[in-house]
Amino acid sequence: FRKKHQQEKENTTSRSPTTEHVATYYRQLASSDRKQQIAFVQLTEEDVQQLASIRPLFAKHVERIVDAFYDQVGQMPHLRKIIDHHSTIDRLKQTLRAYLMDMVSGEIGDQYVIRRKVIGNVHNRIGLFPEWYLGAYAIIQNEVLHILMEELHPTEATAVYRSFNKLCSFDMQIAIE
Ligand code: HEM
């Protein structure tokens, strides 16, 4: 039983989803009222497939991204105040980890958009201004670039990084609208 349980756990956390699975979700977006936005940031089904394919790599390094993020955010006194008022860095590390793994889940469809909308609303409610919310993506993107350059051939790393940035832009669009 333990072995089966372990396998299931690995399947959901680190294995890449199938091409068909990714396509099913992407089709939802391509036929929704988000289609102009995905066209604008040029997020294609191939981008989502590419991101899904690096899911195991992301699972391996997600801690690094999350640590870099909160090291940097925590250094800004007014941001630190917002965090201490509403949550804790430990708890937020968990939510950011889940957020990042969602980006490489291959499940970029209607529910993904709703999840992003909720996250945008949460930050609005706590009084985090968009310039800080959007600026924080630079921390994530820098760390992701480091990881990709360490793990992949530069050509592949560049391609994945472009896909990742497109999805970041899409997430930003949803969060601040
Ligand atoms: C909550 C992601 C920037 C402070 C959250 C949640 C996620 C998230 C996924 C959980 C939302 C939920 O409960 O459903 C992100 C991302 C960011 C970002 C992707 C930018 C790239 C920031 C920054 C701060 C911050 C710069 C600094 C103050 C908080 C706080 C909460 C929160 C305090 C908890 C709010 C509450 O539960 O009342 N964030 N965050 N976030 N975030 Fe962020």
Image (spheres, rainbow, N blue to C red):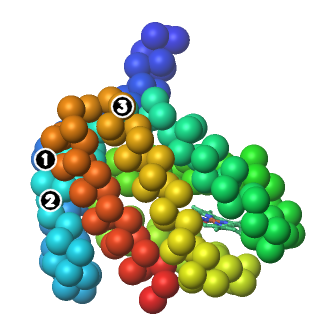
Front residue of 4 and 134: 134
Task: State the CA–CA distance, disc 2 to disc 3.
Answer: 25 Å
Q: Is residue 21 above or below residue 169?
A: above
Residue depth check, mark 2 versus mark 3: number of the one nearer the observer: 3
Name which of mark 2 and mark 1 comes first in the sequence: 1
Does residue 11 appear in this view?
yes
Q: Is residue 131 above or below residue 103?
A: below
Name which of mark 3 and mark 1 comes first in the sequence: 1
| Amino acid at the residue labelled 3 | Glu
Tag 2 and tag 3, C-beta contact below 8 Å:
no
Q: Which mark is residue 45?
A: 2
Q: Is residue 38 left or right of residue 120?
A: left
Task: State the CA–CA distance, disc 2 to disc 1.
Answer: 11 Å
Q: Residue at x 47, y 18 (%)?
A: 6
Q: Residue at x 25, y 82 (%)?
A: 37
Name which of mark 2 and mark 3 comes first in the sequence: 2
Q: Secondary structure at mark 1?
A: helix
Q: Quadrant of ligand 1?
A: bottom right
Task: State the CA–CA distance, disc 3 to disc 1.
Answer: 29 Å
Q: Which mark is residue 6?
A: none
According to the image, label 1 marks what residue?
20
